[in-house]
Amino acid sequence: MKTVLITGANRGLGLEVAHQLGAKGFHVLAGIRNAEAGRRAEALLRGAGIRADYVPLDMAAPDMIAAAADMIAGMAGGLDVLINNAAVHYDTHQRVGAPDFAIVEEALAINTVGAWRMTVAALPHLLRSEAPRIVNVSSESGAWSSMTGTTPAYSLSKIGLNALTRMMASEFRGDGILVNAVCPGWTATDMGGGGRPVPEGARGIVWAATLPDDGPTGGFFRDGKPIDW
Ligand SMILES: NC(=O)c1ccc[n+]([C@@H]2O[C@H](COP(=O)([O-])OP(=O)(O)OC[C@H]3O[C@@H](n4cnc5c(N)ncnc54)[C@H](OP(=O)(O)O)[C@@H]3O)[C@@H](O)[C@H]2O)c1
């Protein structure tokens, strides 16, 4: 049985990816920062017949990231897939000329450095897998080719995540770890506030999580198709 750790798995795309990968037979480790939400998501997934465990995980708390990795260390098969999904601050109210830097710093801490830190902590356990995959859930807002002054905190955090995707793919290629960035498209979660149905947005993330060994690495995808950086 393969194991996946999904950050921010209590709602939105993270919870839906947990459902979709659970239905494919994955053991789901649901990384969730709020204990009550964690227990609720665990019960929901188990109720759907999925092997799921809630993992206390705040992406802004390095000690919790380390503790989550320690928990995986005790598991027989290691970790097959890491999905860096948790994110905050889609700051449509801000412009680059007048940002609230507290928001900028928090977006970078959670969306970018948190994902980086999580990946480093999970790395020894991914290396125990026969088919390790890392999916960085990104956004077209973080595409260099279409960058504007809107959503500055979020966009900066996602272009940073995209850069990390390239760095990680290059660095981990020799270890057989496939690392890709996925934009789910505009999706009707709390963050999206509208858009396409959540199961549709989640599908491209699941695709990247279940790539065959000869699948791509270091790419930026939506719905399984390359998009511009
Ligand atoms: N929806 C879209 O249109 C869209 C488009 C492009 C990209 N994306 C990306 O897709 C991913 C999922 O977004 P979503 O639309 O599902 O958003 P969402 O509904 O707002 O869910 C965000 C998730 O991240 C969690 N989270 C936030 N900060 C966290 C922290 N410090 N530690 C742990 N978990 C934390 C939230 O947990 P709490 O419940 O505790 O807050 C929640 O589970 C994000 O990376 C987002 O940038 C979304």
Image: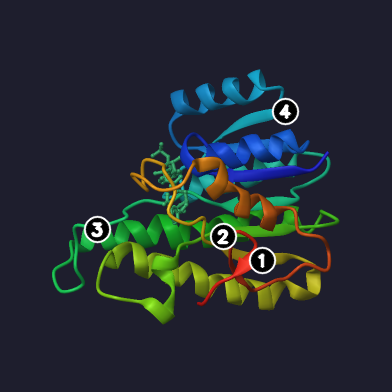
* Circle on res. 88: none
Q: Which residue is mark 4?
A: 51
Residue 34 image offset from top left, x and y in percent: 43, 31
Q: Amino acid type of disc 1?
A: Val
> Which residue corresponds to mark 3?
92
Query: Pointers 2 and 1 in contact (CB under 8 A)?
Result: yes
Disc 2 residue type (three-letter) = Asn
Q: Pointer 1: what residue?
A: 179
- How far is the residue under mark 1 from the one under mark 4? 25 Å
Contact flag, marks 4 and 2 (Cβ < 8 Å): no
Q: Nearer the N terminus, badge 1 or badge 4?
A: 4
Q: Is residue 29 visible?
A: no
Crowd rating for badge 3 (residues with CA inside 10 Å; few <14, some 14–19, many 20+): few
Q: Amino acid at mark 3?
A: Thr
* Element under disc 3: loop
Q: Secondary structure at mark 2?
A: strand
**What separation in Å lies between label 4 and label 2 (alpha carbons)?**
23 Å
Q: CA distance from mark 2 to mark 3?
A: 22 Å
Q: Quadrant of the N terminus?
A: top right
Residue 94: where, in percent of width, then height?
Answer: 19, 62
Q: CA distance from mark 3 to mark 4?
A: 37 Å
The mark found on residue 136 in the picture is: 2
Q: Residue at x 61, y 53 (%)?
A: 205
